Amino acid sequence: MPLLLALLSAVFYGTADFLGGVAARRATALAATVVAQAAGLVVVAIALPLFPAAPPGAQGVLWSVAAGLTSGLGVALLYYGLAVGRVSVVAPVTAVCAIAIPVLVAAALGERPGSFAVLGIAVAIASVALISRQADRGGAKGGRDRSVAIALCSGAALGAFLVCLARAGTASGLWPLAIARATSTVVLAAAALLARVPVVVPRRVLPVALACGAVDIVANALYLVAVGRGPLGLVATLASLYPASTLLLARLVLGERMRRVQSFGLVCAAAAIVLITSG
C-alpha cells in the first residue's frame, strides 16, 4: 500500500507541476505560486476536520515549518523554471536532484542503500548533464539554459521538503501538512510584497492556478501517508517519478519535443530511479 500511494502521489505531483508551469507562463510566476499555495491551504483546512488528530508537539511543528519553507522555495523555483524553460528539461532535472537527498538522508538514518542504489545516484547525476544539453536560440548545440540551474536549486529544496515532511510524521494527521502549507503561503506572499509583485493572476489563468494548488495538496497528503508506512528512501524515490506525467502532459498539450541526447538523458533518469528503488 505505501508504494502504491507513493506512485499515486507522483501522478498528482506531476500534474500539479504541469498546471503550475502553465499558470506561471501566463501570469507572474510568483503571483501564480502564491495563489496556488493559498488554494492548497484552503483545501487542507477543509479536510483537516475529516482526519481528527491532536496537533503535533514542538518538534513536529518545527519540522512542519521547515517543510513549508523548503516547499515554498522549491515550488516557486520550479514554477519559474517551467515558465522560462522547457518542461522536458526542468521537470526531470528537478526530480533526479529531489531523489538523491532523501536517499542520502535515509542512509544517514540507518536505511543502508545497496550497491544498486549507489549506482542509481551516480546515473542520476549523469542524467542531469545529458538532459541539460540543448540547442540555444541561435541554433548552437550544447548550450545550457538558465532553467537548468533553477531546476537544480528547486530539486535540492524539494528533496529537503520530502525529508522534513517525513520527519514531521503522520501521528498528527494532516496538521503537519496544514502548518507547512500555511508557512509557505505566508512566506511567498511576504516575498511578493517585498518584491512589489501584485498577487493577481488573469481571470483565464485563475482556474489553472487553483487546480494546481488543490492537486498539489492531494499529492502531499498521499506522500505523507505513504512515508508514514514505508521507508523514506523508497517512498521518496517513487514519489519523484512525477516527471513522467509532467512530460506526458507537456507532449500532449504543448507539443514539446526533445533532442536525442535529452531523450537518452531521460532514459538514464528512469534507469536511475529503477536502480535506486532496487537498491
Image (cartoon, rainbow, N blue to C red):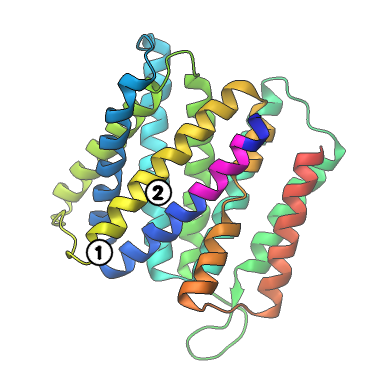
Q: Which residues are magenta?
A: 5-12
Disc 2 to disc 1, C-alpha distance? 18 Å
Q: Is residue 68 above or below residue 171?
A: below
Q: Residue at x 24, y 49 (%)?
A: 35
Q: Which label was assigned to residue 205?
A: 1
User: Residue 273 placed where, x, y %?
Assistant: 72, 48
Dot 1: element? loop
Q: Quadrant of residue 135?
A: bottom right
Query: On the picture, is 173 further left or further right than 142?
Result: left
Report whether 73 appears left or right of 7. Answer: left
Q: Could you tell me what secondary structure mostly forms the magenta stretch? A: helix
Q: Residue at x 17, y 65 (%)?
A: 202
**Numbered label attached to residue 75:** 2
Q: Are marks 2 and 1 in contact (CB under 8 Å)?
A: no
Q: Check disc 1: other Cα within 10 Å, few if <14, some if 14-19, many if 20+.
A: some
- Image point 68% across, 24% down: which residue? 108
Q: Where residue 192 sits in the image (x, y, percent)?
A: 19, 50
- Above or below, comparing residue 3 to residue 35 in the picture: above
Q: In the rendered image of this protein, does residue 145 appear above or below residue 164? A: below
**For residue 180, which numbered disc appears in the image?**
none
- Crowding at dot 2, Cα within 10 Å, few <14 / some 14-19 / many 20+, comes out as many
Question: What residue is shown at x 62% (from left), y 22% (from top)?
Answer: 229
Residue 8 in the magenta stretch? The answer is yes
Q: Is residue 101 visible?
A: no
- Three-letter amino acid code at disc 1? Val
| Mark 2 residue type | Val
Location of residue 80 (image quadrant)? bottom left
Q: Extreme right residue here?
A: 115
Tell me where residue 166 appears, x and y as whole percent.
53, 26
Q: Residue 26: x, y in percent?
A: 28, 69
